[in-house]
Image: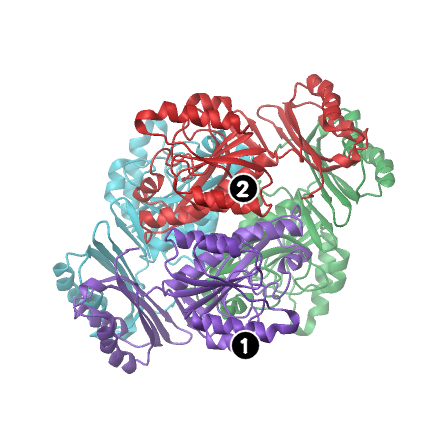
Chain colours: A cyan, B red, C purple, D green
């Protein structure tokens, strides 16, 4: 991956002859150097998906001008599209509960430059991780979400997310279910890590469910949050081998490694605009 | 694995102090050389599981005498137990439909000595694989199972299984659901390969289900067949990575590799008496 | 994967602005529907690699005409290129020794349509697999390669390969080292499966080497054969987990599964013209 | 895993009839409840390996008495043996350089109780990780190891290791080669993580080597350090899939996940006395 400034153009549209030529041609006609290009034609839906990364320095104008040049083509082709500037880091709000494994992992990746984003703040319904988060110089917002007071908690949460101008919300083992309006407001921008290989073991205590069923692999799933619990578009999954020797506590421990790795991979793909959602599925370039 | 004659003693019983000492001691007191030993204590159920492999040549008597010597201990300890002779090959009946990938794979493993058993016959509801099976010198029994005539088909199937004196029945992508009485009669002796990572995608067309859900891994599950479809004790599972690029046809093709490998591993473990069933779970030593 | 007729255009050339536009544009200008397109820019070598699959039916002329239209562009861009017709199946010569696991696997994939090619013949220095091969209706050529008579054996081998007009030679656990002139004559067309995770354990008896070193994973490598033993460009690799419990015989047995799967994947990629060689490395689209 | 106090007895000795009976019997005769037991007979060397975990509370005496009771048997059987008390946490000295991924990971596992040990101190030849380490309340010792001054640096290092009474030294991406005398003094107690799938890519810059060779998987190896660089007994290994798309920088980034996971698994096994070394290989129970 180049650390140079790039513009990433991601889109989908009805499939037809000449899409690549026209879009690549638009960049080329202004001298734009495409350093990465991916395409996918979905035969079932007859839809075309693409992601192109152009070196900013090779274009004679800025991204706003480029957007205006893309617009007519996008309209003609009926594209859903976005054009993003690598210098405009996405603002990420992390949400967590008491467990530290995903947070420690994400924060180290962020600090060492493997996850390129701004972490605007961390919101948690517990104080446990405050000190860790603040060590990284990130604001920590404690927002209790009590059984009897969920509405107030989530109102406060929403207000903070707005104030911190979040582009992306990551539920890093946040143990609460987000209210529907928040899911809709940040559609395809809320990323969750579920501690099972979905669609197996939806809902609470998936490792207990896995142990009862006697599976020989456990997994984790990174997905966009939608109004249907654990049913949103899957970004990334992975598994780890287990046997009869592992108790539920062992599954929880072994699962942590899968959870943190899968979440980091999924988030990275999201941050690099590699993920296109169509229906309830993702294309990950 | 030694090719020498061995006796395998597999059992489970309520956990208590001294089980290993007593069982290992029984063999040792007659000079029996234990070449493999595995134990597992399940804290939840307070149950003990073990498998020991003894070299036959080191004992001064045959397996029938050994059984009589084991019996009092087994009774005292309330064991479920079996003692099997490596020279008594298990008689396996393979059942298949049209697909050849599992059959080709199993037959080659059998012919080259990687799966140590007698294949008594192959039963199929289609003629497609007759020639392949007969090339291996194995009887091929064609038993159509029509929608309108299932009872007759399965009566014939059961008769054949009995006549061929099956110790084990393998559903190598046999596309029919066995009747309940057969499942019960051959409890923990009927092995199926299901083409999904159970408990995801139970029932028909799991690759279609997987494609619709947009999972990033597909899997296969080898399990004992019980009266509840795809709910029996899991012996082995594995997965393969997929992406948006794979159509349902691709999933079917990629899944074949997982299916045949997982079935072969599960069957091998069964044949070597490495699998102990407890409740709806397996211990695989 | 579509079963419709397609033309696959694979090339590499010095990187510059506009390559995608020009090549995709060439197809689009004649109405050609690109159903798959992959690109890669190697920053280190400043070289561009691509593979495009066009639906034949959408072009108003045949592949010979298309080739003539591609030529000027290819020359201008200094491309290494090939344009292949999915209806022109590649002619594959399989070479084997005594071991059947790779052969059984490849032949079943071929018979069931998962490997799309013509298998021209099988050449072996042992008679063991004749009957299996002939069951599939494929000519079996026995060419002994004795210690004292290698030159004659390989002269006969080369003659057969020429007579059968091989496009591709697959060493499916053929235990002999091909002579240098044959490697050069069929450069990047001879595919071998080596039974280790290269570059570990080059040469003879890799499972013995692996056992001595005490590795916790064993592997297999599918690569193009060059004049340097086990040093050619790697197409595909995979591994399997092992432990202290596995003897060398167990490693050999477990390794077979990795070998046959890796060989089949590598060969499939080659047959679909997904593999581009550059220096001693491959791009696999 | 039980959190109750346990004694772990690990040993190897020449194989013979009755070892299990005698050792298990010794515990049973005093009422000792064996909650885990593993055995392995190595046919090649005719050596027997075992690890047994006994619940301390079920024995009527302490570990010192138990040791005295084990001694005569151990002598008779010519055992290499150890008997360790779960309440006596191993004292671990971590050594690192600038990279934080392994350290962050280990420290979080330690803090959350997944790695059960005392971390005596961290020794580093750079100051970069001081603040992180001290946040966890662990002493940080800066010991520069300059090209011109290695002897002094390692003398200081050795002195610290002694002062902190280390039972185990972990090179968590410490980029220096330990002097031979230190390796010998702490034989099978110094654990390193090497950033390749050994024996591939021994020595410096393994990801560069991997990229040049064009491998399709990269790996990491956790091993005991011996006087031969990267040649010590392997405890654990794993791999991650890569393709032509990954630059060396990408390999470095992807490799970090493998490194930290493999190191944590290997260290955990060491801390639980699951690893027995024999020759240049390990048995990992």
Question: For the residues carrying marks 1 and 2, which lies nearer the camera in this image?
Answer: 1
- Image quadrant assignment for residue D87: top right
Give the labeled residue for mark 1. C180
Q: Is residue D26 left or right of residue D214?
A: right
| Image location of residue C62, percent across then percent down | 21, 70
Q: Is C250 above or below relative to A21?
A: above
- Image quadrant assignment for residue B204: top left
Which one is in front, A30 or C13?
C13
Q: Quadrant of the C terminus of chain C?
A: bottom left
Residue at 44% across, 73% down: C162
Residue at 73% across, 18% down: B72
Q: Residues within 10 Å of mark 2 (few under 14, many from 20)?
A: some
Q: Is residue B190 left or right of residue C70?
A: right
Question: Quick check: do tags 1 and 2 share a chain?
Answer: no
Residue at 80% across, 44% down: D13
Res. D134 visible in picture:
no
Circle 1 marks a residue in which chain? C
| Image location of residue D167, percent across then percent down | 72, 49
Q: Is residue B144 left or right of residue D149?
A: left
Q: Is residue A243 left or right of residue C15?
A: right
| Image location of residue A279, percent across then percent down | 24, 45
Circle 2 marks a residue in which chain? B
Which one is in front, B246 or C142?
C142
Kindly report the distance in space between the C-alpha atoms of the residues bearing marks 1 and 2: 40 Å
Residue at 62% across, 45% down: D268
For label 2, the SS is: helix
Tell me, for residue A8, which label it has, or none.
Answer: none
Q: Is A107 above or below relative to D177?
A: above
Q: Is A143 above or below relative to D171?
A: above
| Image location of residue A284, percent across then percent down | 33, 54
Give the labeled residue for mark 2. B265
């Amino acid at each position: 991956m180049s650390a140079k400034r790039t513009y990433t153009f991601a889109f989908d549209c009805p499939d037809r002859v000449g899409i690549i030529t026209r879009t690549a041609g638009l960049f080329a006609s202004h001298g734009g150097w495409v350093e990465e290009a991916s395409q996918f034609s979905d035969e079932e839906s007859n839809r075309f998906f693409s992601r192109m990364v152009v070196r900013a320095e090779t274009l004679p104008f800025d991204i706003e001008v480029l957007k205006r040049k893309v617009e007519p083509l996008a309209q003609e082709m009926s594209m859903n599209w976005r054009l993003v500037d690598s210098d405009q880091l996405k603002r990420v709000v992390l949400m967590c509960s008491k467990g530290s494994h995903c947070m420690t992992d994400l924060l180290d990746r962020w600090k060492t430059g493997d996850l390129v984003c701004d972490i605007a703040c961390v919101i948690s319904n517990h104080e446990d991780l405050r000190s860790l988060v603040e060590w990284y110089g990130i604001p920590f917002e404690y927002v209790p979400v009590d059984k009897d007071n969920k509405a107030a908690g989530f109102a406060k949460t929403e207000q903070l997310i707005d104030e911190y101008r979040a582009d992306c919300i990551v539920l890093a083992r946040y143990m609460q279910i987000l209210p529907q309006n928040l899911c809709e407001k940040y559609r395809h921008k809320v990323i969750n890590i579920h501690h099972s290989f979905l669609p197996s073991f939806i809902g609470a205590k998936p490792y207990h469910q896995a142990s009862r069923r006697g599976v020989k692999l456990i997994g984790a799933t990174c997905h966009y949050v939608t109004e249907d619990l654990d049913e949103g578009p899957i970004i990334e999954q992975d598994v780890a081998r287990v046997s009869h020797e592992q108790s539920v506590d062992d599954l929880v421990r072994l699962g942590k490694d899968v959870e943190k790795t899968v979440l980091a991979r999924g988030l990275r793909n999201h941050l690099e605009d590699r993920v296109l959602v169509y229906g309830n599925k993702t294309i990950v370039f």
